[in-house]
Amino acid sequence: MNAPLPSTIVPPMLVMDHVTVDFDGFKAINDLSLTLESGSMTVVIGPNGAGKSTMCDSIIGRVRPTSGRVLFHGQEIQREPEHRIVSRGICRKFQTPGVLTGLSTIDNLVIAATADRRWWKSFTNAGQDEARARAETVIEQIGLRDRAEALAGNLSHGEKQWLEIGMVVATDAELLLLDEPTAGMGAVESTQTAGLIKTLIGRHAVLVIDHDIDFVAQLNGHVVVLHQGQLLREGTLEDIRNDEEIAAIYLGRAK
Amino acid sequence: MSPPPSRTLDPKAAIWLAALLLAIIAPFIVSAYNLNLIGRFLALSLTGMGLVLLWGEGGVLSLGQGVFFGLGGYVLAMHLKMADLGQGELPDFMTWSGVTKLPVWWAIFRSPVTAMLGILIVPTAFAVLFSWLMFRRRIGGTYFALITQALGLAFATLLISQQGLTGGFNGLTDYHTLFGLNLNLPSTTRALYWLTLLLVVLAYFGLRWLLASRFGTMLRAARDGSNRIRFLGYDPGPYKVVAFSVAAMLTGVSGALFTLHAGVISPALVGVVPSIEMVIWVAIGGRYSVLGAIAGTLIVNFAKDKISTALPELWLYALGGLFILAVTALPNGLAGFFGSDRWKRPALDETLARWRARKAVS
Ligand SMILES: Nc1ncnc2c1ncn2[C@@H]1O[C@H](COP(=O)(O)OP(=O)(O)O)[C@@H](O)[C@H]1O
Ligand SMILES: [Mg+2]
């Protein structure tokens, strides 16, 4: 089952290989296998408690798989420290915004955009010009130019969401995991967010978790349906919409 | 054309400059008794400054700073005791306890050079090791505070129990010469006072530099969101290790200077209660402000000197009361009454800026 791939084949960017996450007997993720390709757009939907956030957690190292493997460019990462996984080029936005409240908006972005994150580099300004330039670009993208010098802790909820998305983007990671980026946003803001996310595809592979079907439709990505920790269906949004079983357990309920 | 930069000194800086000038000429205007007190309290303020870095900016509360204070103080005191001895002689308390040979970890500090290095290295090396073990295992918050408190208790207990090697409960006292200078001469006292003042000023500028550097930003980031920066690819541990160790080094120097001014170091100065007092100086002065920590240390210790000579029973209650007041009503301490640093803007400014941003979006 876990036979190594022939060396002539380039491995996919990310592979979740039969991953199970067991919380004291409760399998939040149950034998889940999934492949993500570079530059792709994937949307994960599923009812509350389906295990969507836990899936992201198991990729980024916040929870550790009880069994199974996570491979990034063919290398196992499921036992590495979080910051090492991130350094490989995976970054995640959490469901509840976790901005650095005591720092300004722009400083949040500069920290995210700094490429060399080894601690002793913090005594120098090496690479800071590039990081600042990238932060300036991202702050335009997320529309927080006017709030650059404001304390992140004083931003409104929606602004924090955008800052958090901005931080993930600023890292320039190859794979971006966005967990409910529109939580707490209105329709207009959601549409803006969808527009922002679509500009990321290609340069980054993006995996978005969301509840809002309108938002998912705007993203126009490959859709994965999770249910009780298992992959129920994959396909285009049309395929999923026309699937009776899914309509019964998820979309039907959402109506 | 832009307006020429203003030449007028801002009033806060003027006040501090005046205070510094007064401090420099203090030996000629205050009594020897008061000069000794100021010297002691300035020495203590190095401990307070360390806590600004560690607790204020790093968010790590240590209730065991007395350990590092004691390590610096005891290293110097051991040197001072040996400086008064002839060849082959032992400190009096060792002889009384039946110790016949000077232990190696005493003998190393006989030379002034190793003693000075020891004051810097012993507390710092211990701090690096201890904090690395703690932060690597992600121990923080209340657990960390409790562990450091236990460390302080263990240190004081160990000192007391090893009567023949440490001077026990009485500690180490009664020294007369430093680098061949007579410690009782007024000229020596004055020189030591100025040395202390110089070190306080150097530490002040050093800390300001460190806090303004990118390291300072990362330390605040690690304080506000250890997990957040971990998931941005940073390891938060080393920033806290550095903060803890720099604080420990300052505290060690603080202990050594205090030992010189006070003429004694003993377990009663390094255990649990003194360690908590150190935190209180900074809570009252302002834990986000280096100057606030210096002011807090001086004010609380002068108050202690006055109150505890007049009404000894009252002091602990007064201290407790001040602490509760500082924590509940003045989270930024006395420094909160002055100025606003970049990361602590006045609320009004913020509200206005947010309102403007809203208007711009809609
Ligand atoms: N640390 C944890 N310990 C125990 N149970 C957890 C933990 N994290 C999540 N769960 C459970 O796992 C299930 C999946 O959670 P989650 O991944 O957050 O779902 P989703 O993001 O799809 O709403 C939920 O039932 C949740 O209660
Ligand atoms: Mg979730």
Image: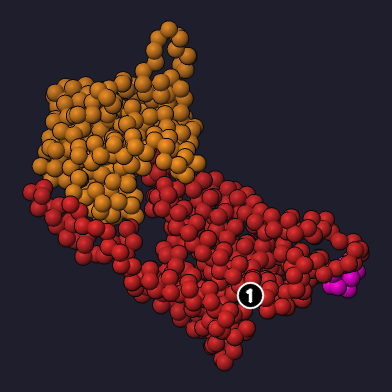
Give the residue drawn at x 46%, y 53%.
B210
Chain drawn in orange: A
The span picked out in magenta is B90-98
Q: Nearer the viewer, residue B224 or B282?
A: B282
* Image spot of residue A141 (x, y percent): 20, 37
Q: Which residue position is annotated with label 1?
A: B190
In this picture, residue A72 sits left or right of residue A209: right
Give me the chain letter of mark 1: B
Residue B172 counted in the magenta span: no
Q: Amino acid at mark 1?
A: Arg
Q: Is residue B125 visible?
A: yes
The image shows residue A249, relative to residue B197, as above or below, that is above
* Image spot of residue B112 (x, y percent): 75, 59
Q: Quadrant of residue B69?
A: bottom right
In this picture, residue A227 sits left or right of residue B277: left
Mark 1 crowd level (few <14, some 14–19, many ≥20, 10 Å Cα): some
* Image spot of residue B276 (x, y percent): 55, 70
* Image spot of residue B23 (x, y percent): 51, 75
Give the residue drawn at x 34%, y 61%.
B341
Q: Is residue A228 visible?
A: no
Q: Nearer the viewer, residue B261 or A2?
A: B261
Give the residue drawn at x 83%, y 56%.
B104
Q: Colour of chain B?
A: red
